[in-house]
Amino acid sequence: MYGEPALPPDFVSLPYANPDAPKGGQIVFAEQGGFDSLNPHILKGRAPWGVYSHVFESMLGRSYDEPFTLYGLLAESVETGPNREWVEFTIRPEAKFSDGAPVTVEDAIWSYETLGTKGHPRFLGSWQKVEKIEQTGERSFRITFNTPDREMPLIMGLRPIFEKAQWEGKDFAESSLIPPIGSSPYPIAEFEPGRFINFRRNPDYWGKDLPFNRGRNNLDLIRYEYFADASVVFEAFKAGEISSFREGNAARWEDSFDFPLVQQGKIVKAEIPHERPSGITGLVMNTRREMFADWRVREAMLQAFNYEFIAQTQNGGRDPRICSYFCNSVLAMQPGPAEGRVRELLEPFADELLPGALEGYALPEGDGTARNRRNLAKAAALLEEAGWTPKDGRLVNAQGRPFEFEFLIRQGSTEYQAIVNIFAQALERLGIAVRTTTIDSAQYNERTNSYDFDMTFYTRALSLSPGNEQMLYWSAEAADTPGSRNWMGMRSPAAEAMITDMLETADPAEFQSAVRALDRVLTTGRYVIPLWYSKVSRLAYDASLHYPEKIPLYGDWPGWQPDVWWSE
C-alpha cells in the first residue's frame, strides 16, 4: 500500500515460518454451534470457518508480519496503473485446483463476477467500484476501477478463486453441502453437519515449493469438532480430544489450567504477544430501535453498566478495558481534544458529531462497588433529559410506554449470561425491564443478519490496515444491507468521509490521521458498551505441536495457527 515490501524478491520464506518444518500429524479445533452449508461466500446458510480459510486461494497472499503488503500466490506477477486505476494479474502456469484442473483466466473472471453479483453482500461494495474485467493474455487479466481507491488492487488480489466448471448448472447463491473445489493444499475430506469437518493435505498441491508457502501447510489433517456449549468445549480439551484452546478470561487462565494433562506436560501453555488493535467487543445497541436512536440513552446505558464491578467478578480485573475501536495501536484516538490534522478532518462535521468527538471523550468510570450509585444517578439524569421519567417504579416516556428491551444471547454463552444478569439488575433500579432471550446458533445468525434484536453481544476485530471493509462495518448503506457488520445501524457522514480519505490518500501520515478521526466518531457514537481486551493471546495446546520462534506482528491471528505450525 505504501513504500516497498519488507521481503526481497528472492526471499526464502515468510519471516514467521520455519522452512525446515516437518510434514505430518494433525490438529483438532473446537467450534461452537454447527453448520448446514459449505459455501461461506453467500448470505444463506451457516458454513464452517475452515472452508473459507483452508480451501481457497487468491491471486495474492497476506504476510501477517506486514499490515499492508501482499505477495504473489496464484499470481506470478501483478501490475498496477500509475494511480492504481487498474490492476493486472498474471496467473502462474503451474497453478491447479485440487482436482488437477488448471486455474485459468476464465475461472478467475467468473469468480470475481459471481462474488460481486451473487455472493455475500460484503463483496458488493468493492464490485461496484469495478468498471470492467477483461482477459489481456493467455494467463493474464485486468480489472479497471471507476472510483479512486488505492486499496482496490489489494482487495481484488485477495478474492477467492473458484473452479467455474464445478458450478455449471448450479445456483451459487443457494446454500449447499457440496464440497467446493479450490486450489489450496487442504480440500474438504470427510464431514458430518453439526459434528465435524476434516481438511486433508493434498500431497500433490501445486504450490508447495513456492517461497511464500515454505514452512506453511505442514499438518496432514486439520479437523474441526462441533459442540453445543462453550463449557463442553473446555471439558473436551481437558480430556485430550481437542488440540488447541484459546482462553479469553485471564482469571480462568490462572485458575483453571492445572488439570492432569497440563501437570503431565502433555498440554503446554503459552502467551502470544501481538501489536494489533483491540477491536471492539461488548454490548451493541441497535439504533434502529427507537429508544437506542437517542445518544443520551446510549450514554445512560454506558453509565449504568458497572464495568469495574463486572470485570472484577468475571476476570479479576486483570485485563485492560477497550478504550476505543483501535485501542492498543498507533491508529487509536488520542486522549483529550482533537488536534492538528485529526481536528481539520472532523471540523466540517461539527454540527453532526456527538459530544466528545472534538472536545475529548473517555468511557465512564464507576466506583467499583456493586451499587455504582454515582453513575446510576448520571444515567437517570440522561434518561430524563431524553424523555424517560419514573412512574410507579417503571421508566416511561411521554406516551406512557415503559422502557423495556430484549437482550439476545447465543445458546452456550454462559459467561455472557452472567454479565447480562448484573447489568439487568442495575437497569432494574432505574425502572428499565430487560428480557433475556437465549436461542440456538441458527436462529441467532438469522436474527442478527436481519438486525432483529435490541441489544446483544458484538465483536469486530480490526487490523493495522483498515480499508474498504470499514464501509461494510459502519456505512449507511451497510445499515440497510442484511448480513453486514453494521449491527448498530449507525449512519454517519463523518465516518464515511474519514473512510474515503483513508482510501484515497497516498500519504501514511494522512492515513493515520483519518483512522484516528474515524476512531473518535465511532467511540463517541456510543454504539457499544466495551468490555476488555488482552495484550497477549492465551493459548494452550497439545505438546506435540510446535510453532516458530518468530511471532508475526498480528500474533495469534488467522494465518498463524495452524498455517505455520507443525507436529513432532
Image (spheres, rainbow, N blue to C red):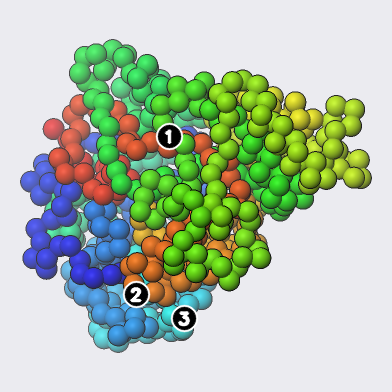
Mark 1 residue crowding within 10 angstroms, few (<14) / some (14–19) / many (20+): few
Residue at 85 percent of width and 33 percent of height: 390
What residue lies at 35% left-to-right and 67% top-to-bottom? 509
The residue labelled by disc 1 is 320
Give the total number of marks visible in the rendering.
3
Tag 2 secondary structure: loop
Q: Quadrant of residue 164?
A: bottom left
Callout 3, which amino acid?
A: Thr
Measured as percent of width and height from the top left, residue 508 is found at 33, 68
Residue matched to label 2: 506
Tell me residue 336's x, y (percent): 49, 51
Q: Residue at x 62, y 33 (%)?
A: 305
Disc 1 is placed on an element classified as loop
Q: CA distance from mark 1 to mark 3?
A: 40 Å
Q: Nearer the viewer, residue 149 or 453?
A: 149
Q: Nearer the viewer, residue 390 or 365?
A: 365
The quarter of the picture where residue 152 lies is bottom left
**Mark positioned earlier in the residue sequence (3 or 2):** 3
**Which amino acid, by three-letter code, is at mark 1?**
Pro
